[in-house]
Image: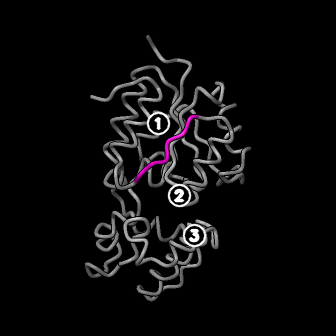
């Protein structure tokens, strides 16, 4: 039976795309840096990334973290980067498909085939990737709803962000499964009444299995 009254709601960075921490080799090639230049690894090595620990402890925001990393990488290139999106747009290069998680593609296709609605709920999709990114990534054309704080200026975990997404989907909050790699955003989704999965960037397949199971789907 089609799951027309269910929705899979995904964060973009870290959930649909691989994190910048996972793609240092791609970034170094795109930027012309020597292999091994980029050493900050966030959740993959919290002990070695003090700035990441500050972000996780809410001493700085996620945007503060990436702005600091952008300035750091800009200096390596002899440039002054004062916008965090410069790092993402320059480091990702021209091959956007190379940074998309295959587990995400499989889950999105399965949910779509089952009749589920699809939504992206992001704090900085176009801000980070550029306004033309959606046209360059065909996968995003499969989504019914994209709520991007680049334009709404309402950042997760503000309850209004989730409410706006649910309203656009036309479903009850409890019929939506929300997936995010930041715990604060996951807890915000839980408080807003959504079913939630805290995405583990080190176990993406397992996290997607959890999300699909909440929708009543079993991946192959």
Q: Quadrant of residue 172?
A: top right
Q: Is residue 205 magenta?
A: no
Q: Earlier in the sequence, mark 3 or mark 1?
A: 3
Q: Nearer the viewer, residue 116 or 207?
A: 207
- Residue occupying the far right of the picture: 160
Q: Earlier in the sequence, mark 2 or mark 3?
A: 3
Classify mark 2: residues with Cα within 10 Å, few (<14), some (14-19) or many (20+): some
Residue at horizontal 64%, vertical 73%?
59
Residue at horizontal 33%, vertical 35%?
106
Question: Do callouts 1 and 2 mark residues in contact (Cβ within 8 Å)?
Answer: no
Q: SS class of the residue under badge 2?
A: loop
Classify mark 1: residues with Cα within 10 Å, few (<14), some (14-19) or many (20+): few
Q: Earlier in the sequence, mark 1 or mark 2?
A: 2
Across the whole image, how many numbered discs are drawn on residues? 3
Distance of mark 1 from mark 2, alpha carbons? Answer: 16 Å
| Colour scheme in use | one colour
Q: Which residue is mark 1?
A: 141
Above or below, 72 against 108 in this view is below
Above or below, 199 against 21 in this view is above
Q: SS class of the residue under badge 3?
A: helix
Q: Quadrant of residue 46?
A: bottom left
Q: Quadrant of residue 111?
A: top left
**Which label sits on residue 161?**
none
Distance of mark 2 from mark 3, alpha carbons? Answer: 24 Å
Q: Which residue is mark 2?
A: 130
Give the position of the N terminus as an image quadrant: top left
Give the position of the C terminus as an image quadrant: top left
Q: Nearer the viewer, residue 143 or 122?
A: 122
Q: Which residue is mark 3?
A: 55
Q: Which residues are the magenta region?
A: 195-200
């Amino acid at each position: 039976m089609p799951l027309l009254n269910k929705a899979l709601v995904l964060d973009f960075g870290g959930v649909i795309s691989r994190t910048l921490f996972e793609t240092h080799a791609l970034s170094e090639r795109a930027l012309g840096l020597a292999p091994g230049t980029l050493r900050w690894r966030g959740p993959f090595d919290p002990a070695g990334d003090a700035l990441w620990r500050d972000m996780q402890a809410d001493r700085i925001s996620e945007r503060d973290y990436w702005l600091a990393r952008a300035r750091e990488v800009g200096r390596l290139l002899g440039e002054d980067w004062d916008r965090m999106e410069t790092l993402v747009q320059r480091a990702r290069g021209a091959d956007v498909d190379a940074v998309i998680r295959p587990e995400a593609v499989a889950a999105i296709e399965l949910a779509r085939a089952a009749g589920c609605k699809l939504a992206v709920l992001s704090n900085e999709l176009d801000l980070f990737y550029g306004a033309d990114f959606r046209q360059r990534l065909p996968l995003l054309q499969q989504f019914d709803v994209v709520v991007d704080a680049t334009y709404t200026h309402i950042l997760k975990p503000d309850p209004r962000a989730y409410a706006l997404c649910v309203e656009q989907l036309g479903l009850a909050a409890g019929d939506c499964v929300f997936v995010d790699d930041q715990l604060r955003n996951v807890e915000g989704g839980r408080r807003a009444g959504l079913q939630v999965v805290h995405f583990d960037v080190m176990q993406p397949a397992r996290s997607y299995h959890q999300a699909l199971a909440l929708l009543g789907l079993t991946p192959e």
